[in-house]
Image (cartoon, rainbow, N blue to C red):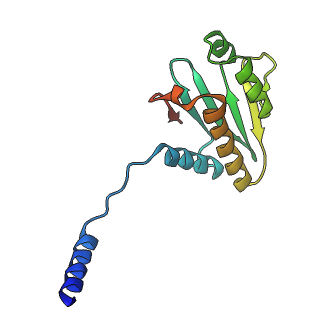
């Protein structure tokens, strides 16, 4: 029994000596990092490029104590069948409003830092998973600062 304990202790010591490797940063961590930088005012604006070729972009911008989320190029997205009535109505249901010229959908989030973080992450999840089908963004999604 003592031999078994000794062997296990040696194996544990050997494993503890192996350098730890860092996992590659996942999309969630990249997004969280950019949201934190925005909330800490280290970053004023960033874009989430959902589909580059179709200009499906979400612009996230810190303005004073608020965060503005903008979906630009709405007319082009409608023309290319990326946006249609059902999706537009879902954006409106989330509180997005058309600009005067109707070229953008905009929503402003208010609250303290924790509320803004939660509201923004929730809104992004709803957009990616409920308004759009996340597989539409396969390998084309990235963050631009």
**13 in relation to 62, above or below:** below
User: Extreme bottom residue here?
Assistant: 2
Q: What is the x, y in percent for residue 112?
A: 76, 54
Percent across and percent down for residue 135 are 51, 29
- Which quadrant would the C terminus be assigned to in this image? top right
Q: Quadrant of residue 43?
A: top right
Image side of residue 69 versus residue 98, left or right: left
Q: Which residue sits furthest front?
A: 1
Foreground residue among 65 and 73: 73
Residue drawn at x 60%, y 47% is 35
> As drawn, is 52 to the left or to the right of 74?
left
Q: Pick the quarter of the image with the N terminus.
A: bottom left
* Residue 96 relative to residue 139: left or right: right
Q: How many circles with numbers are drawn on the protein?
A: 0
Compared with 8, 131 (above or below) is above
Q: Position of residue 116 (x, y in %)?
A: 71, 49
Q: Please report the residue visible at 57 percent of the width from the left and 33 percent of the height from the top.
A: 48
Which residue is rendered at x = 55% and y = 17% of the image?
Answer: 54
Residue 71 sits above or below residue 122 on the image: above
Where on the picture, by quarter, is residue 47?
top right
Question: Depth check: 95 or 34 in front?
Answer: 95
Q: Relative to 76, is 102 on the left or the right?
A: right
Residue at x 70% of width, y 55% of height: 114
The residue positioned farthest toward the top in the image shown:
79
Q: Position of residue 2 (x, y in %)?
A: 21, 90
């Amino acid at each position: 029994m003592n031999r078994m304990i000794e062997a296990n202790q040696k194996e544990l010591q050997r494993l503890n000596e192996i350098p730890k490797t860092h996992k590659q940063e996942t999309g969630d961590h990249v997004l969280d990092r950019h949201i934190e930088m925005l909330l800490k005012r280290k970053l004023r604006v960033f874009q989430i490029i959902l589909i580059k070729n179709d200009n499906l972009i979400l612009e996230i911008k810190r303005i004073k104590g608020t965060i503005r989320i903008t979906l630009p190029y709405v007319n082009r997205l409608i023309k290319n069948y990326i946006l249609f009535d059902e999706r537009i109505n879902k954006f409106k249901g989330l509180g997005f409003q058309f600009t005067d010229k109707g070229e953008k959908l905009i929503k402003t989030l208010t609250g303290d830092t924790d509320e803004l973080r939660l509201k923004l992450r929730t809104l992004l999840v709803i957009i990616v998973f409920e308004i759009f089908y996340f597989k539409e963004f396969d390998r084309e999604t990235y963050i631009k600062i």
